[in-house]
Image (cartoon, rainbow, N blue to C red):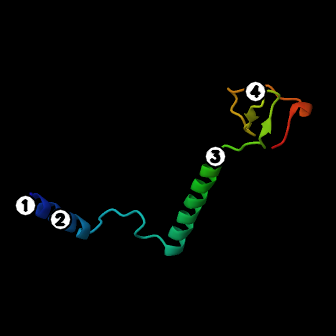
Amino acid sequence: MKKLLVAGITALITLGTAPVLADPHQNKDPHALASDGIQSLLKAMEMMLLAIPQYEAPYINENGDIIIRRKNPSPKSEQPSVPEGEKKEI
């Protein structure tokens, strides 16, 4: 077991100190690299926010059920609208 652990640590040290031969960012300007990174981060955050479902305010229907509808429902799930007179805001 000790030999395996020593071999693993040796392999990690060897791989960690090996020079990188084909780094595509090696010749790029640091400002350009930072700009690309920020743009990628902003795009990822935008995609994350679009993936989070948005909901309307909850209300109680005539049966006492609490209904919370999505603001932007998917095209597959078409829900009937509730007349404004039947809504009770919580």
User: Residue, x 57% and y 65% (percent of image)?
Assistant: 38
Q: Earlier in the sequence, mark 1 or mark 4?
A: 1
Q: Is residue 29 left or right of residue 80?
A: left
Give the residue at mark 3.
52
Residue 79: which numbered mark, if any? 4
Q: Is residue 42 above or below residue 66?
A: below
Q: Earlier in the sequence, mark 3 or mark 2?
A: 2
Q: Give how far across and how far down residue 5 sits, in percent.
A: 13, 61
User: Residue, x 68% and y 32% (percent of image)?
Assistant: 74
Give the spatial CA distance, label 3 vs label 2: 42 Å
Give the spatial CA distance, label 2 vs label 1: 10 Å
| Mark 3 neighbour density, 10 Å: few (under 14) some (14–19) many (20 or more) | few
Q: Quadrant of residue 67?
A: top right
Give the residue at mark 1.
3
Looking at the rendered structure, the kind of residue marked 3 is Ile
* Disc 1 + disc 4, Cβ < 8 Å: no
Q: Earlier in the sequence, mark 3 or mark 1?
A: 1
Give the SS element for disc 2: helix
Q: Is residue 49 above or below residue 34?
A: above
Q: Give how far across and how far down residue 13 sits, in percent.
A: 20, 68
Give the SS element for disc 3: loop
Q: Give how far across and how far down residue 12 sits, in percent.
A: 21, 64
Q: Is residue 75 above or below residue 8?
A: above
Q: Earlier in the sequence, mark 2 or mark 4?
A: 2
Give the residue at mark 2.
9
Q: Is residue 19 left or right of residue 50?
A: left
Q: Nearer the viewer, residue 2 or 24?
A: 2
* Disc 2 + disc 1, Cβ < 8 Å: no
Give the spatial CA distance, label 1 vs label 4: 64 Å
Q: Give how far across and how far down residue 24 sits, in percent.
A: 40, 62
The residue lying furthest to the right in this view is 85
Q: Quadrant of residue 65?
A: top right
